[in-house]
Structure formats: C-alpha cells, structure tokens
Amino acid sequence: MRGAPISRDADWLPAIEQFGEGIFIHFDEVAIGRWLASGATKARHDRLVAGYVNCIKRFAGEPPNYPGTAYVLLHSLSHSLMAEIALDCGYPASSLKERIYSLSGAPGGAPDRCGILIYTATAGAQGTLGGLVGTAPRFASILRSALERATICSNDPVCADHEPDDRSGDRATHGAACHGCLLIAETSCEMRNLFLDRSLLKRIPIIWKHSLHA
C-alpha cells in the first residue's frame, strides 16, 4: 500500500492561535545548591531515589528518568502555587499549566538554572483577562499562604506518613502528596503528578503524636 502524495508540494502547516499569560519565578541557584548539600535534604533524596527505583521495576517499557531532588522541590512548589493562585486570580485550577526549569550542566549535580513558569493558554480571549499577571504584585503573600497551606493536609496523618517505598505502587515516586494537597489535574501537570513531596517545602508538624501524650 502506498499513501497518496497529497503533501508533497504543500507550503503550509496546520496550526491554531493561542492567547495566554503567565508568571515566571526565578530561583537563586546558589541557595538551591546549599539546600541540596544539607544533611536533611540528602537523607530525603536517598528515600526519593529508593522509591523511584522501586517504581521503575513496575514499568514494562522505558521508565522516566529521575529528574533530581531540586526538580521535586520546584515541582511541589509549583503545584502548591497553582492551587493558591487559582483561589486568588479567579482562573479555575484546571486552566493553569506549568513548566519547571531545573537545568544542570553536570549529570546529578546542583542545577545551574532554576525557575517555574505558571501560565494559561486557550484558543479564546479568556486567556488574556490579566488575572494571572495581576497576581504579581501580591506574589509574596501568595507564596507565604501557599507554604502555610502546605504545612498540613486534610488527609494527614495518612498523607504526611506516606513514604516512597516498595509498597506504594505508582505512588512510590513521591512522598507526602495526595489529592488533598499537591495533586492537581493531570492536564495541568507536566509530569502526570509524579515526583512530588510536600515535606520538601515545609516541616510537617506531627500533631497527632501530641494528642497521644495529652
């Protein structure tokens, strides 16, 4: 069978026009490097890598590469910010999308460039309403609220206790993360809700242990 040569002399390509807006957050790479070198981060890194190793054993094809613990940090913060921005700017959370930049010149080394792009893009004019860009002057308070909200989840202590281990199935790629805190619509996430950990953002209080001693 031979296909018809209908595009042999074509001088056009199919395309759609999109309208949108976004905000870009750049991070201090030196501070990220210091954070990666701390003992607590190294211990969490080992747990996340062990969970990733357990997860790829279940893949029949080629599994995704481990993106690095700096990526997990930025990815977790991106999801937390998207949920907070949706409450502030009026856009539905499912209309927001992300792009995570954690670029390193040396494999496994500290990233040379770090950033998060949160944007919305649609085929209609609603992507240019300015609600997302309008959050920029209030970004400090939005970030503060996002981190405070990440301290506790409605599914704690189950969510906070979750570890990336060989008993977690597909959830072995992330730590403390569930639909009550960090998981978002998969159409908005560039990693299908993989590689997330709320404990990298804030120290999670073990409030239920205090009640045992009350």
Image (tube, helix red, strand yellow):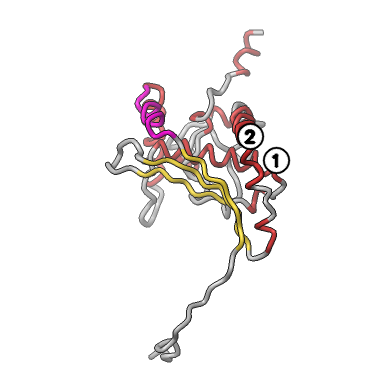
Which residue is depicted at the point 41% across and 22% down? Answer: 40
Coordinates of residue 67 in the picture (x, y in percent): 39, 44
Q: Residue furthest top?
A: 214
Give whichever of 53, 36 is nearer the camera: 36
Which stretch did the figure color magenta?
A: 28-38
Residue 123: say if magenta.
Answer: no
Q: Is residue 200 left or right of residue 152?
A: left
Residue 142 — which label? 2
Question: Neighbour class for label 2 at 10 Å: few (<14), some, many (≥20)?
Answer: many
Q: In this view, does 52 lie to the left or right of 182?
A: left
Residue designated by label 1: 88
Coordinates of residue 143 in the picture (x, y in percent): 59, 33
- Three-letter code for the amino acid on which mark 1 is drawn: Asp
Helix, strand or loop at mark 2: helix
Q: How far apart are marks 1 and 2 (CA)?
A: 8 Å
Coordinates of residue 70 in the picture (x, y in percent): 41, 36
Helix, strand or loop at mark 1: helix
